[in-house]
Amino acid sequence: MPTASTMPAPHLIELLPRLLASGETVAPCAVVDVSAFDHNAARMRERSVGLPIRVASKSIRSVAALRRALEHDGYRGILSYSVPEAICLAREGFNDIVVAYPSVNTLALRELAADAHLRREITVMVDCTAHLDLIEAAAAGAGPVRVCIDIDCTLRLPGLVIGPRRSPVRTPEQTRALAEEILRRPQLRLVGLMGYEGQVASVADAEMGAAGAIKRLLRGTSMAQLVPRRADCVAAVREIADLEFVNGGGTGSLDVSARDDSLTELAAGSGFYTPVIFDHFDDIDHVPATFFVCQVARIPGQRWATVNSGGWIASGPPAPDRAPVPEYPAGLKYSATEGAGEVQTPLHGSGAKDLSIGDPVWFRHAKAGEMTEHVDRIVAVNSNSSYEEWDTYRGKGWTLR
């Protein structure tokens, strides 16, 4: 069901002006409500129905936040987004790291292959023999390097493909053939399979009207088509290799994916922060945990206020739902001609009438981890209004490709 309240909690609203006035925090800044973060972790664990959840670091991008996530029961390992990120996390003490996307970064692959500790803790993704060749060349006699096969989980309808086109490996025969090729190469070690159903995990199922009905139909059709095919792919590989894990699912599909007996674990990351994208999912009674705050720099007219920055647009097809949502004060809207800007963002409406120079305006990002690319740290506020600062990857100086 849609989230009951999307505004920041009162203790956050009360604390931030003090931090800004004292200079302890400078806007624009990111804020996480720690109790909401923990609530969301507990809810995702309930929805996973006993399957362990691998934490998707792309949606978090903060070492402190990742540590907090993994402190919760039911969470195990990290689903990373690049080999350089995985190396950094392994050197921070994290273990059992799976890189969710194939890498062609030969320097990072060489660094991984040359280090026995990194080879133990990091698994890289493959979906074709070209990936195997590249990893072998980078290993240059070292190894073995742990690898995982990515299975295509798109929904195929007559003349239509729906979902992220992640892999050319779709059938049990294709999956087994790639597995056999890996087994022929002593510098590689096959340890897992991944099948991420993005067209289910990131598509809202509680929207009203015809659009919502179509999305629910596509979600149901997708899982009905995927589950037996994914199970057949897994079975085909298990006939010739011992697999440590089979990963699937995401925040938006934990309860659905958990019913697939071929999976040994799920993945989730965005749900800890709960950005705007999850406001219209059924059975996700999360609390928005992460916001960013910009300060009013201009009052250009009656019922208008302009904040510094604010144009933190999410990736994906350009559309209104990729823009941040101004949440507090309530009643703020973008200018139709300017929208959310890189340097400044004009806002208008009833929420602007009492704003003054320097006042904070609270936004929610459309997605999760992308917000952290704009800030060096996150102000992590506890329910008793105590707080600490969680460094983001940017704050640690990590440039991860």
Image (cartoon, helix red, strand yellow):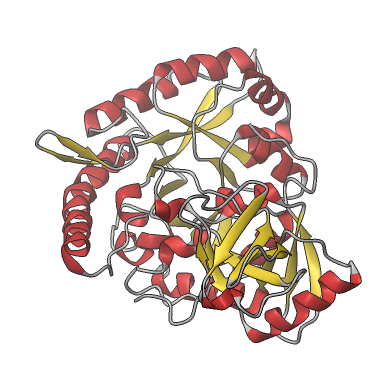
Where is residue 60? Give x, y as percent.
61, 55
Q: Count the marks.
A: 0
Where is residue 76? Give x, y as percent.
57, 58
Quarter residue 211 falls in: bottom left
Q: Answer with left or right where residue 212 lies relative to residue 251.
A: left
Residue 51 in view in this figure: no
Residue 109 in view in this figure: yes
Q: Answer with left or right where residue 166 lies relative to residue 43.
A: left
**Residue depicted at x 62% and y 33%:** 83
- The quadrant in which the N terminus is found is bottom left
**Residue depicted at x 65% and y 85%:** 10
Is the residue 182 above or below the residue 225 in the image? Answer: above
Is the residue 255 above or below the residue 340 in the image? Answer: below
In the image shown, does 14 or 277 lie closer to the viewer? 14
Residue reaching furthest left? 158
Q: Answer with left or right where residue 142 lies relative to residue 18.
A: left
- The quadrant in which the C terminus is found is top right
Is the residue 79 above or below the residue 287 in the image? Answer: above
In the image shown, does 86 or 362 lie closer to the viewer? 362
Quarter residue 165 falls in: top left
Residue reaching furthest front? 301
Where is residue 267? Give x, y as percent.
47, 55
**Residue depicted at x 35% and y 68%:** 280
Where is residue 335? Give x, y as percent.
50, 57
